[in-house]
Image: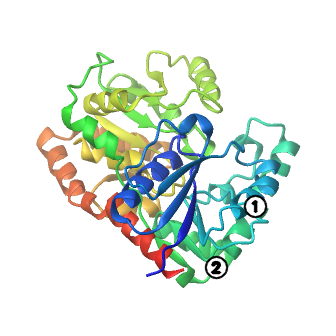
Amino acid sequence: MKIKRLGFDARLIGETGVGRYIKNLLLCLSLIDPVNLYFIFLKSNDLPKFNFRNPNFHKIALDVKWHTLGEQLLLPFILQKYKLDLVHFPYFNVPVFYPGKYLVTVHDLIIDHTRTGRATTLPFPIYLAKRLFYKLILIKALKRAVKILAISKSTKKEIISHYQIPEDKILVTYDALDSDFLRLAQKLVPKKYYPFDYLLYVGNAYPHKNLEKLIMVMNDPQIKQRVKLVLAGTDWFFYPRLKKMVDQLKLKKSVYFFGNASDKQLIDLYFHARALIIPSLMEGFGLPNLEAVCLGILPLVSDIKVFREIWGNSLLYFNPHDQDDIKRIIISALNLPKQKIKKLVAKAQTRIDRFSWQKTAKDTLLQYQKI
């Protein structure tokens, strides 16, 4: 078998979401592929943070900011210096002038559903120009990629439907639990941050997360007197909007903003929550649900295709557009006996084994070898 020179754009490894995908995929690839040569492109400050025991994994500093003109103009020349047989771009920010073969991972198509000014903190004309720029890059990336990896069947179907990409060009490789998160969860003695019952939300506050609707539900007297809401996520972009809304509704004693949580803090928050609640209008996969189920916590989730794909009928679903239905599911969950909750979580846990980084890495490596 020919030894391939494989490039991997890992500049986003330190970010949430896609960063975990990059870290876990590379870690598993380094364990299962002793043959091919890997050139891992990282930001300089990330070089000492991530080490691979595989001697065929070479770390290279690449301080070009993503989603910039510099990325589009400089990356093609830099990558060509390494005479790569294939490059894996784990996000859609592909340098469109790169002439070599590449594979791209698509995590979601939120960009196709965010057309209004609510989806940005930028002045609307600038947002429209930026969105058009991203959209053109995405279209070019999908058309020119030799293979596309989608993190769920729902995302794959959207790619086919929105961009007329042949079905056999797209492979589904699921997300999975972060290896560090799992190790920490097994040895941690959970700390309690709040002295009251609460529902937990984990993630950012982009409009498609539908948190304004959830906060409106928390204003209902029947909910307010029984449970609080804790929001855990990076305190930037859209969270200030929500804080303003909470102030206006006088909900400071019902809605709490934890801010960005470390893995340890996140495990603590999950462990003491009555339930996880995810009211998203759309998702690519939904990792917090997986984390919660792993820790024995029941997720209450919006009834969207990707959650049905991942979890079948093992979670409690609600209509994310309907405040009354969100209220209904919260009250139902609060009234459930502990034994019934355990039974539901156990049912959901039977589905966890479908999602492993080892399997995702094997499927990804197979594509590297085929191309």
Percent x, y of residue 321: 53, 50
- Mark closer to the observer (1, 2): 1
Mark 1 / mark 2, whichever is N-terminal: 1
- In this view, the residue in front, 171 or 341, is 171
To which residue does mark 2 refer? Answer: 165
Query: Neighbour class for label 2 at 10 Å: few (<14), some, many (≥20)?
Result: some
- In this view, the residue in front, 304 or 261, is 261
Among all residues in the image, which is located at the extreme right? Answer: 125
What kind of element bears circle 2?
Answer: loop
Say which quarter of the image contains residue 45: top right
Percent x, y of residue 215: 51, 31
Measured Cα–Cα span from mark 1 to mark 2: 24 Å
Instruction: Name above or below for residue 47 compared with residue 83.
Output: above
On the question of residue 137 being in view, the answer is yes
Q: Tell me the residue at 19%/32% (across/down).
A: 187
Q: Which mark is residue 214?
A: none
**Residue 34 falls left or right of residue 283:** left
Name the amino acid, label 1: Pro
Among all residues in the image, which is located at the extreme left? Answer: 339
Q: Which mark is residue 76?
A: 1
